[in-house]
Image: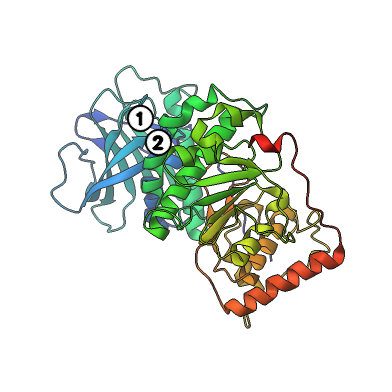
Amino acid sequence: MSAPTRPRFEPKTDFEGSNLPPLSSTGHPWTSLLYCDAGFPKDLFQIALAQLVEHPEYNSTLILRSEQLSDTTDNFPHEIPLLEGHVPLRCIHRRLLPRRPGRDNPLEQYCTLYARYDDDLPTVLVLTPLGSPLPYYHPAVSHIGFRYLDSDPPTLQLDVLPLPATPTDVNSRLFRTSLALLDTLHRYGWGAMTNYKKRVQHDNLVPREVYQDMYLQMREKYKHLVNSWQETTDPLKHVFEDIGIATYLILLWKFSYHDRPANGFLDFGCGNGLLTHILISEGYHGCGIDLRARMSWSHYSKETQDRLHVHAFNPFSETPDPFLLPGVFIIGNHADELTPWVPVLSTLHSASGYISIPCCPWTFDAKFDRSSSVRFPLANGEDEASFVESLSLGGHASPSSAYSMYRVWLAGLSRHCGWQIECETLRIPSTRNWAIVGRKRWGDANAAERNIDDILQSVRDRGIFKSRKPEGKAGDH
C-alpha cells in the first residue's frame, strides 16, 4: 500500500464572508493575513506547534537555533497579549541565535500557548519578540499568532499585530514570511497525524548546540582561506565543508578519547590537504597522504607542509606502512577508491577508530556495481530491513539509489571488520554528508581478523588491484 499523501497546501486571503474573525486583544487591532484547511484534528495542534517553537531554524537560513530560557504555566509576563475569549496555558521564553552573529543580533521571544475558556486544548500560539530594533530575520510585528479554528472544515489561520507602517499586502515581506510559516505548520500537523519519522538523523554522536557554537568560532578563524584558495574547485564549498568536518572531529575526539586519539590522525587520501591543515593548526598531531601533491600544499604553513606526504597505499606491501600506526584515527573524507579500505585498515593496524564520508562508490578494486557486489553477512538473527533502517540513510534511501545501496554495503563491511556501526548526517554544505564512524570494536576479534584475511585473499585472487605509483616529485613531501 502506498503511503498517504499530504493534502495540498492551499492558502487563502479572502476573509470577507469567511466567518473567520481575527484575534482580538484589549486596544490592539490584529490583522488576519492567511488561512487554510488544517487537514488534521485539534488534538495534534500542540504537537505541530512544538516543532515550530523548537526549530525556528527550519524557517529561516539566518537563524542558527533557539535556546530555551524558561518555561512557565503561571505568573505570565506582562508583555504577552490578553486575548479575548482565551486564557494562557504555557509560556516559553526562548532566545533566537543568528547564524551570523557578526551581522545579526540574538533576539529573545515569548512563545505563549492559549486555550479557549471552555477548553483545555491549546488552539493559539502567539510569538512575542522582546526589544527593538528587531533583527532582519524577524517579521516586523509586535505579535504573530497561529490559530486552530473548529470550523467546517477545521482551519489554520495566521494573524499579526504589525509594527506601525509595516506593509501587509501579498507582495510584502511580512506576507511572504507568514505564508512560509503557515505552510510549515500545515506540514507539521500532517506529519503528526501520519506519525512522520524524520529520515535524516543529525547530532547522534555530537550535540547540536556544542557543534554549532564551536563551528561559528572555527568559521571566523578560517574563513580567510576562501580568499587564498589555490585549487580550481569552489572555495566556498570546500573551505566551509572542511571547517565543518574538522569541528566535528575535534568534538568527536573530545567525547570519545577525552581529548584526542592515542596516536594522532591519518587523513587517508587527503587531496587538497585543507582538513589536515585545519587540524594541525588546532594543535592536533597527524598527517595527510595522497598520490600527488596539490597546489595548495605549498601555500600552507611549514608545520602543515611537513605533515603532508605523497604516498602510495599498498595493502600487500612487505614493508610496514609508516603512516598506518597502532592507535591512529583514520579519516576517509570523500576518499573514493580508498573508502572501502578504511574499516579494513582500521582493524588490520589496530586503529583507535575511523570516520568514513563516502562519495563516489568503489569496492576494493573496481567501481561499485549494485547488481554484482554481494553484501556482507549480518549477525545471526539480525533482520536486514532493521539493519538498513538503523543506518539513517535519509533522502537517498530509495531502494533504486546506487548511493544508498553502497552505504549499506559499507556498513556491512564495517560490521564484518569488527566495528560497531554508528552513523551521522554531518552539518556540512554537501549532499554527500552521511558518515559512518567506528569507535568501538564489535563481536569476536579473531573472527574479524579472519574476515579481513578472506577479503585480502579475494582481492589477490581477482588480480585486478594494482598499487598506483606516486605522481609528481614525491621526494618533496
x and y, in percent, of residue 29 in the image:
27, 29
The residue drawn where x is 45% and y is 56% is 261
Are there few (<14), some (14-19), or many (20+) residues within 10 Å of tag 1? few
Of callouts 2 and 1, the N-terminal one: 1
Answer above or below: position of 36 versus 160.
below
Quadrant location of the C terminus?
Answer: top right
Q: Along the line of sight, which residue is nearer the eye, 251 or 202?
A: 251
Q: Is residue 263 left or right of residue 141?
A: right
Residue that badge 1 annotates: 101
Are there few (<14), some (14-19), or many (20+) residues within 10 Å of tag 2? some
x and y, in percent, of residue 345 in the image:
64, 61
The answer to whether residue 267 is seen in the rendering is yes
Q: Is residue 287 left or right of residue 358?
A: left
Query: In 3D space, how far apart are the residues under numbered discs 2 and 1 (Cα atoms)?
Result: 8 Å
Q: Quadrant of residue 318?
A: bottom right
Answer above or below: position of 418 versus 148.
below
The reply to whether discs 2 and 1 touch (Cβ–Cβ < 8 Å) is yes
Please identify, in this view, whether the residue under mark 2 or under mark 1 is nearer the observer: 2
The residue drawn where x is 56% and y is 34% is 305
Residue that badge 2 annotates: 216
